[in-house]
């Protein structure tokens, strides 16, 4: 079965007043749906880019995200699906698409998963 990366995009700068009520719970439900369906291979949430991202281009190291943008990658998931249409159906259900962000689906060319948990 083919594997696809689902990149989750969110607003780069969101304060508490802009937070969508129930957003975290909606993402948790979507995650559980992917687990239950057997589609989910891996998923990771990222800390906000502002204040945590460090970019490297050539020999230059810069504090902050690689580009200044209205949206940043907030997390990603790797799923298995029989084809792109099935992957798009899974991605379309992601709450980010209804919470002011969006998702990008890309087929994986290759990869490696080490046998250890992600850092908390």
Image: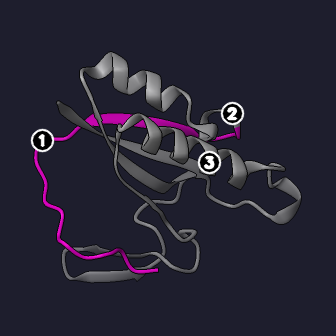
Q: Is residue 11 above or below residue 85?
A: below
The circle drawn on residue 109 is 1
Q: Residues within 10 Å of mark 3 (few under 14, many from 20)?
A: some
Q: Residues within 10 Å of mark 2 (few under 14, many from 20)?
A: few
Q: What secondary structure is found at the residue carrying circle 1?
A: loop
Q: What secondary structure is found at the residue carrying circle 2?
A: helix
The reply to whether the C-beta atoms of the residues labelled 3 and 1 are less than 8 Å apart is no
Residue located at (36% from left, 27% from top): 87
Front residue of this view, candidates 6 and 25: 25
**Which residue in the rendered view is the most extreme toward the front?**
36
Q: Position of residue 32 (x, y in %)?
A: 53, 46
Q: What secondary structure is found at the residue carrying circle 3?
A: helix
Q: Does the stretch in magenta take in 92?
A: no
What's the distance in space between the residues labelled 3 and 2, CA to CA? 11 Å
Q: Is residue 21 above or below residue 87?
A: below
Q: Nearer the viewer, mark 3 or mark 1?
A: 3
Q: Which residues are magenta?
A: 99-120
Sequence order check: which comes first, mark 3 or mark 1? 3
Q: Which picture quadrant has residue 17?
A: bottom right
Residue located at (56% from left, 29% from top): 93
Sequence order check: which comes first, mark 3 or mark 2? 3
Q: Residues within 10 Å of mark 1 (few under 14, many from 20)?
A: few
Q: Is residue 76 above or below residue 86?
A: below
**Residue 70 makes an appearance in the image:** no
Sequence order check: which comes first, mark 2 or mark 1? 2
Q: Is residue 111 left or right of residue 9?
A: left
Residue located at (47% from left, 56% from top): 75
Q: Position of residue 102 (x, y in %)?
A: 56, 37
Q: How is the image coloured?
A: one colour
Residue tagged 2: 98
Q: Is residue 1 left or right of residue 24?
A: left
The circle drawn on residue 27 is 3
């Amino acid at each position: 079965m083919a594997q696809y990366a689902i990149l989750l995009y969110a607003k780069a700068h969101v304060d508490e007043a802009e937070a969508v009520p129930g957003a975290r719970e909606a993402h948790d439900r979507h995650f559980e749906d992917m687990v239950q369906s057997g589609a989910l291979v891996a998923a990771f949430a990222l800390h906000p880019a502002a204040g945590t991202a460090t970019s490297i281009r050539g020999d230059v190291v810069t504090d902050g995200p690689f580009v200044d943008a209205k949206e940043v990658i907030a997390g990603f998931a790797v799923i298995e699906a029989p084809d792109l249409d099935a992957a798009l159906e899974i991605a379309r259900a992601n709450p980010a698409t209804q919470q002011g962000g969006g998702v990008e689906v890309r087929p994986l060319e290759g990869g490696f998963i080490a046998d250890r948990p992600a850092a908390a």
